[in-house]
Image (tube, rainbow, N blue to C red):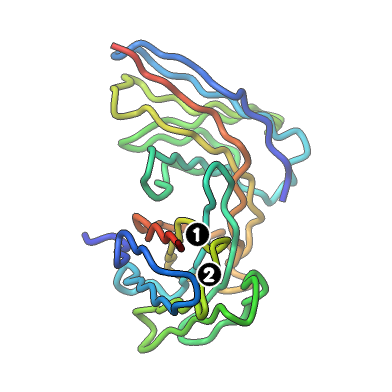
Amino acid sequence: DAKTTQPTSMDCAEGRAANLPCNHSTISGNEYVYWYRQIHSQGPQYIIHGLKNNETNEMASLIITEDRKSSTLILPHATLRDTAVYYCIVRAASGYSTLTFGKGTMLLVSP
Amino acid sequence: GAGVSQSPSNKVTEKGKDVELRCDPISGHTALYWYRQSLGQGLEFLIYFQGNSAPDKSGLPSDRFSAERTGGSVSTLTIQRTQQEDSAVYLCASSSTGLAGGPITDTQYFGPGTRLTVL
């Protein structure tokens, strides 16, 4: 699976949009971009994934650049409960693939 | 609907004792994964089940570790003769297919984990 690069940490004010970037310049054509987050002392939580089109669900939006070399996870109205480590992962499009988390981005949402 | 559940949530044991950790996957999910996460570290894959079979157990760190799955549902991870280095959070995840060669990477959903402390 391709390597990803994320900032170590980011700050966001409560109620504002949090935009978390991820670089994946070596992504292959059949690899998906996945985002998970892990709130302190909890198991990882799936957020969203996409191949090449932008995606939106009840938690977040995922914007993937046209060349697919980078993406941005958007939390439209961050709350204090969104404080967590966010992981961007690139996974091969096969039915079986174990997950490998890098260091992720520590997002701190402040009042 | 119900997510992945794990029990116990916390387990403290003495070095040398055996422990059993349980995972209840999401109903209908055929694939089940065990991972562990040591303090400040990333995810470490342990074993993967498809149904009751374990086609990939390459991540089990030693023969003290074993896992089984029955009825294509509940899984138990057993650690024999625990050591202090076994202390970690043990995470279970499930997905709906996980079949090799499938066209779409399946999303894994995690349980809350079991925090194991070996004294």
B80 and A44: which is toward the camera: B80
Secondary structure under tag 2 reads: loop
Residue at the (55%, 73%) spot, across then down:
B48
From this view, report whether residue A59 is shown above or below residue A9. Answer: below
To which residue does mark 1 refer?
Answer: B87
Q: Using the rendered view, name the quadrant where residue B65 is placed.
A: bottom right
Q: Is A96 or A52 nearer to us in this picture?
A: A96
From the image, tell me which residue sits under label 2. Answer: B98
The chain letter for the residue carrying disc 2 is: B
Give coordinates of residue B102: x percent, y percent. 59, 69
Residue drawn at 46 percent across, 71 percent down: B32
Q: Amino acid at mark 2?
A: Gly
- Tell me the kind of residue under disc 1: Ser
Q: How far from the left and from the top, in percent, is residue B35?
A: 52, 62
Q: Quadrant of residue A47?
A: top left
- From the viewer's perspective, is the residue at label 2 or at label 1 nearer? 1
Sequence-earlier tag: 2 or 1: 1
Q: Is residue B76 left or right of residue B54?
A: left
